[in-house]
């Protein structure tokens, strides 16, 4: 059952990542590209959970899960928020970080025996440096970028920013509460991805449209 729930979450995330990619192709708005990649990373993380639960966890499935879920999702969300705020250098920073994260995920030593089911705790299989420390710093900075940009532009996009913050919180809650199990984490990913997508595509608030309208 856990594998099926995780696989369903992966399909949802992949479908919404594709929808964002199509919007990027139509508009060429750079934040949509970053957000599409972040949802694609969520899809890969959920697929790795399905792999681990169906075939029993090992170093391969854990490495894929950690690369996508711990190293890429939140930082890419933050890059998208910075691009939305007009920080154009964020695109180059995002590319550099993604390359670094993938390189660390491929090279990081993985040790210890894996349980057959249940998402393995990173501290049981990875040293603090470099992978865990990089994940901590990148997730803190990425989440901070999302929250700060959302707070600064809340009056312009109240509904969209509220949904984005709620989506980040839902995904983080699902990943952080190990007692929920693999299925609970997968549901958290799916709910978070749906909220994030809704926030990404939400139109500006009513107050902005009203202020922009010409006086009668």
Image: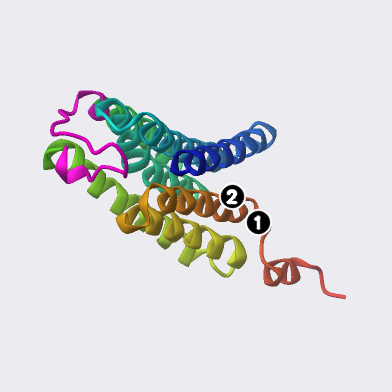
- For label 2, the SS is helix
Relative height, residue 36 to residue 188 (above, below) = above
Name the residue carrying label 2: 197
Residue occupying image coordinates x 65% and y 31%: 25
Q: How many numbered discs?
A: 2
Q: Nearer the viewer, residue 154 or 42?
A: 42
Residue 214 picture location, percent across and down: 81, 69
Which marked residue is nearer to the observer: mark 2 or mark 1? 2
The picture quadrant where one finds residue 92 is top left
Residue 80 picture location, percent across and down: 48, 45
Q: Nearer the viewer, residue 156 or 44?
A: 44
Residue reaching furthest bottom? Answer: 216
Residue 21 picture location, percent across and down: 61, 34
The stretch of residues the image draws in magenta is 104-125
First of labels 2, 1 by sequence position: 2
Relative height, residue 161 to residue 115 (above, below) = below
Residue 201 in view here: yes
Name the residue carrying label 1: 202
Spatial CA distance of label 2 from label 1 is 8 Å
Crowding at mark 1 (Cα within 10 Å: few <14, some 14-19, many 20+)? some
């Amino acid at each position: 059952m856990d594998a099926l729930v995780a696989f369903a979450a992966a399909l949802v995330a992949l479908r919404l990542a594709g929808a964002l990619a199509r919007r990027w192709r139509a508009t060429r708005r750079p934040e949509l590209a970053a957000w599409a990649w972040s949802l694609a990373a969520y899809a890969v993380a959920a697929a790795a959970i399905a792999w681990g639960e169906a075939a029993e966890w090992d170093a391969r499935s854990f490495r894929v899960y950690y690369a996508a879920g711990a190293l890429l999702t939140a930082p890419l969300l933050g890059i998208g928020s910075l691009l939305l705020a007009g920080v154009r250098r964020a695109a180059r920073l995002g590319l550099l970080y993604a390359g670094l994260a993938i390189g660390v995920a491929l090279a990081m030593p993985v040790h210890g025996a894996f349980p057959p089911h249940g998402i393995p705790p990173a501290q049981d299989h990875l040293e603090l440096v470099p992978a865990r420390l990089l994940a901590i710093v990148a997730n803190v900075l990425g989440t901070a970028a999302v929250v700060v940009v959302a707070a600064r532009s809340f009056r312009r996009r109240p509904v969209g920013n509220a949904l984005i913050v709620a989506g980040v919180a839902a995904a983080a809650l699902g990943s952080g509460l190990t007692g929920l199990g693999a299925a609970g984490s997968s549901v958290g990913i799916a709910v978070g991805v749906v909220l994030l997508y809704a926030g990404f595509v939400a139109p500006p608030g009513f107050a902005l449209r009203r202020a922009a309208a010409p006086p009668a």
